[in-house]
Image: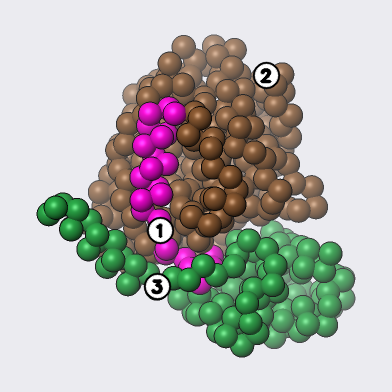
Amino acid sequence: MPLVYAGVCSHGPGITARSDQADPDTRDRFYGALRAMGDEIRASGAELLVVVAAEHFANFFMNNMPAFAMGMADAYEGPIEDPDWLKIAPVKVPGDAEASHSLISSVLESVDVAYAEEWKFDHGIMVPLHFLTPAYDLPVVPCNINCQGPPLTPLYRAWAFGEALRSACDSTPRNIALVGTGGISHWPATPDSGKINEPWDRTFMDRWVAQDKEALLSYSDADIYRDAGQGGFEIRTYIAAAAAAGGMGKIAFLEPIPIFATMGVVASKAVT
Amino acid sequence: MSLYETQKLLYHLNREPKLKASFLEDHDAVLQEYSLTEEEAGAVRDHDIGLLYVLGVNGQILMHFAAMLGIAWGDYLQLMRDGVERHGPVRAGVYKLSGYEGVDAHDRALREKRNQKAKG
């Protein structure tokens, strides 16, 4: 089975940028769970890592905003943020243009995805990679779902994108891991940065773990904006990961870390 | 379209080192290339993070402009609050205020809730 691993994690820049301001015990357990996820990905035999992220105007702007985009390059640069601010050193992350080409061709069978032969990674991908593949030795296929500039793609289309990614993975002989990044409730880069709606997040993750498609897709953007903030729009990446995996989920870490402006999330899915 | 132009300028500044260098040398020379209103151009020229926030600049764009200007994270958050105080509520976009007690108080409240739950 070519999709050999699926999971999700949070990606807030504060996770690395404000590392020194967090409660050390909570932070270290969260970092440990992220690194353990990296170990699981390596143990799965993955040869390629598909990262479904929600970027923040690093590459895509309102002049030409794709609902879905996938990278198609042999290497990507990151982080686009000031490395001293993000506390992640500049790095060239390996990609695989040929593998991307094949996956994109397959996704296009059902979802109109844009492709990008140039892509600068922002914290949405760099923060997870910093922990999952600290040696940057696993080629990455970046995917983006526009969760920043409304109008946004409906949640059921994020599900369809996940299913299309799964079919694409299944059509190649390579072992592929997929990680969705972002969320859950948060109000990043506003004066409300650090607010977390923990009950909302736990309900959402219960639905994610249970693979309850109907409940996962039941939120309106107005609901999300009110209860989970503009950062909550990023649940699209978790929904895509659930659709790609198909099975039940398992939580490795789920605790609010306000100084990181997000819930610390590390969770995986059974690929079925 | 004007808020779009303001955001476009800040997006370009974050992505293009040459433009950033030109901007730091001469703000007006770069501002001329974009169709901003007087209020918007003034906010950019004066590094008025609070007003840019109120005008509706997306926080994911604004935070990089603040970082470029060497503004620390805590100060950036405060400048946005000051902006709302001075200029009124956020006028556009999805980065409006929702009412929040701040990181430390929120952290404490979440812990208390968790402890109560553990006990109960």
Q: From the viewer's perspective, is residue B111 above or below residue A46?
A: below
Q: Which mark is residue B102?
A: 3
Measured in 3D between alpha carbons, the distance from the residue under mark 2 to the one under mark 1, in whole angstroms, is: 37 Å
Which chain appears green? B
| Image position, residue A242 (x, y; %) | 48, 29
For the point 69% across and 51% down, the residue is A150
For the point 45% across and 48% down, the residue is A184
Residue beneath label 2, please? A106
Region rendered in magenta: A189-212
Q: Looking at the figure, which quarter contains the N terminus of chain B?
A: bottom right
Residue beneath label 1, please? A196
Residue B40, image quadrant: bottom right
Please, what is the three-letter code of the amino acid marked with disc 3? Gly
Q: From the viewer's perspective, is residue B41 above or below residue A94?
A: below
| Image position, residue A168 (x, y; %) | 61, 19
User: Of residues B18 and A61, which is closer to you in this image?
Assistant: A61
Give the secondary structure at mark 1: loop
